[in-house]
Image: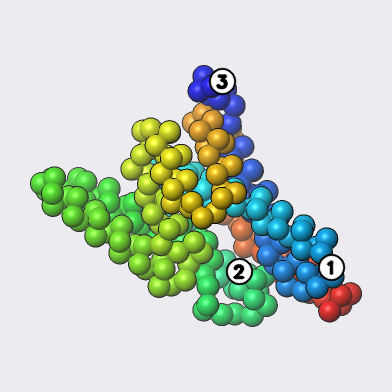
Amino acid sequence: MRERCQKGISSDALKVIAMLTMLIDHIGAAVLERGLLEQGNRILYADLVMRGIGRISFPIFCFLLTEGFVYTHSRKKYIGNMGLFAILSEIPFDLAFCGKFTWEKQNVYLTLFIGLFTLYVIDEIGHMGTSLWETAILMIFTVISGACVAQELHADYGAFGVILIVCFYLARNNRVQQCFYGALCLIWESASIFAYPLIYCYNGKRRLKRGKYFWYAFYPLHLILLYLLHMFLDGFYF
């Protein structure tokens, strides 16, 4: 199976899958759940299916994040870009899911930013030359701190999102372990398990050479469009 998979899924293909499943999920959360569910059971069933499909996206995004961290030419720039889009995405996120600006929950880019920063600190600790025990203690403290920050800030997926990113990174040399530990991190999200065959079949190749910022911009842009769609439908149904 591994040899057959090696011919299959590039990073760009994984990104497209993650983006599409995220879009399906967010249509359910930002449109159906914000009023249309009152229209009947068919809408309710559609929403459940769409939200289930959406569980596939987050593990893939976290996996690709760690791949990017390993292979990027500038980790500081990578982290900075993630932080910038976390800021740019917050208002679209709030409008899409709450209809107003709120501090109740923060967008997933914040989770990814905290996860990236945690990986950066872990990597720096690994190069400090301290003893094994000191290194382990510092790394554990760093992971717990990153997880607590994400949880306290109410970032999407919270502490478990950061821990998932760290697990993908620490097990980066063993795809089976990545899938196993990843599934454990989100064990309550049963539908997310369908992400791991796709991750297992990742071949390490990247096909597209341009459009890097399209992947970043898709998140806030599609949230704005879903908010506008909800407002448009509001005149018909609510």
Q: Nearer the viewer, mark 1 or mark 3?
A: 1
Residue position marked by numbered label 1 in the rendering: 40
State whether residue 167 appears in this view.
yes
Q: Left or right: 225 with respect to 183?
A: right
Give the position of the N terminus as an image quadrant: top right
Which comes sooner in the sequence, label 3 or label 2? Answer: 3
**Kind of residue indicated by mark 2:** Phe
Residue positioned 84% across, 68% down in the render: 40
Residue position marked by numbered label 3 in the rendering: 4
Residue positioned 84% across, 70% down in the render: 39
Residue position marked by numbered label 2 in the rendering: 93
Residues at discs 1 and 3 in contact (Cβ within 8 Å):
no
**Kind of residue indicated by mark 1:** Gly
Residue 224, quarter of picture? bottom right
Task: Check residue 110 in the rendering and tell me which mark sits there, or answer none.
Answer: none
Q: Left or right: 65 with respect to 132?
A: right
